[in-house]
Amino acid sequence: MAEEKQTAGGYHDGGVETVMSVESVAREAAAIAKGVDPADLLALAGNVPYLSICDLHAGYGQMEILHGIELHVARRQSLCLIGPNGAGKSTILHAIFGFNRIFSGTIQVGDGEDKADITRLSSNEKLRRAGIAYILQDKSVFPAMTVEENLWMGGYLIENRQDAKRAAEAIFEKYPRLAARRKHQAKVLSGGERRLLEITRALVMNPEVLLVDEPSIGLEPRFIDMVFEILHDLQTNEGKTIVMVEQNAKKGLEFADIGYVLVSGKLAIAGKGNDLLDNPDVGRLFLGG
């Protein structure tokens, strides 16, 4: 009997004959894991990392999800985390921002001698003092609030409310699409407009590092392109450092300077984004080819 053919989904961008289960992807990804030298990770960050994670063990409650993670990314660089479901990608973002439990290891941010250990800071402190902002997955806007009010909420840590409103006005000046809808409730926005609002709300505090969780999730292709154009502008023209998790591995690696492949809470492969796109094993497991 001929083997039944199936249609690809999930990570795959395009059709392939067979869909691999999450368990199969994880198993095969573990088999091709080469082991990553921390010195190579530093080199990918130009040996001048702005954000660094060293030997991080983290998780939720008593459950450890990350097992000795190393990560380095420089100013004005972007890093995309890919891997099968349950690999620990979002857990890394959560650990950086203070959303989960850190058992051991360090997280540092800053340049040279000004690098500070932020491992144990609260999320508010990481935003206010370390300049790290978290852009959540889709549906994180306040639907009954106006676009303008949502932006003001992005400045909730700014003591002077007028300063928060001025920061919101600067965003409206840069993004006329939002300005035209400033008095509209967020629930009437299109999917692309909601994602734009989620991204720009994080900019009110003028962060240095953006943690972006699934920027393309739930969006039509035309809005996906728009979102990545916005992120490119923030990195290239405003000097933001970006660490993202992206299920559309092809799109994420095309965008990012650096790519990390995670498997079972460990770093399996790392390289320049373009190099991982050309890696046949990465292509077979995560890019649909």
Image (cartoon, grey):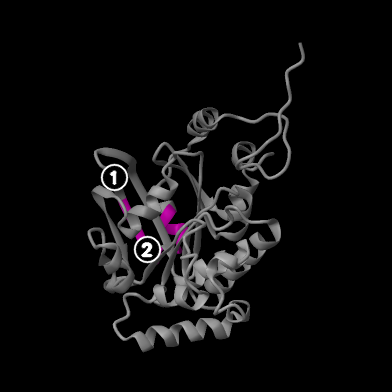
Left or right: where 208 falls relative to 55: right
**Residue at 54% across / 79% down in the picture?**
183
Numbered circle sitting on residue 57: 1
* As drawn, 54 above or below 7: below
Left or right: where 90 falls relative to 63: right
Residue 48 colored magenta? Answer: yes
Are the two marked residues, 2 and 1, in contact with CB atoms closer than 8 angstroms? no
**Residue at 52% across / 51% down in the picture?**
271
- Quadrant (top left, top right, bottom left, bottom right) of the C terminus: top right
- Quadrant (top left, top right, bottom left, bottom right) of the N terminus: top right
Q: Which residues are magenta?
A: 41-54
**Residue at the front extreme of this rendering:** 144
* As drawn, 265 above or below 114: above
Numbered circle sitting on residue 51: 2
**Residue at 63% across / 64% down in the picture?**
190
At label 2, which amino acid type do we have? Leu
**Mark 2, secondary structure of its residue:** strand
Tell me if mark 2 has few (under 14), some (14-19) or many (20+) residues whose alpha carbon lies within 10 angstroms of its own. many
At label 1, which amino acid type do we have? His
**Residue at 73% across / 38% down in the picture?**
15
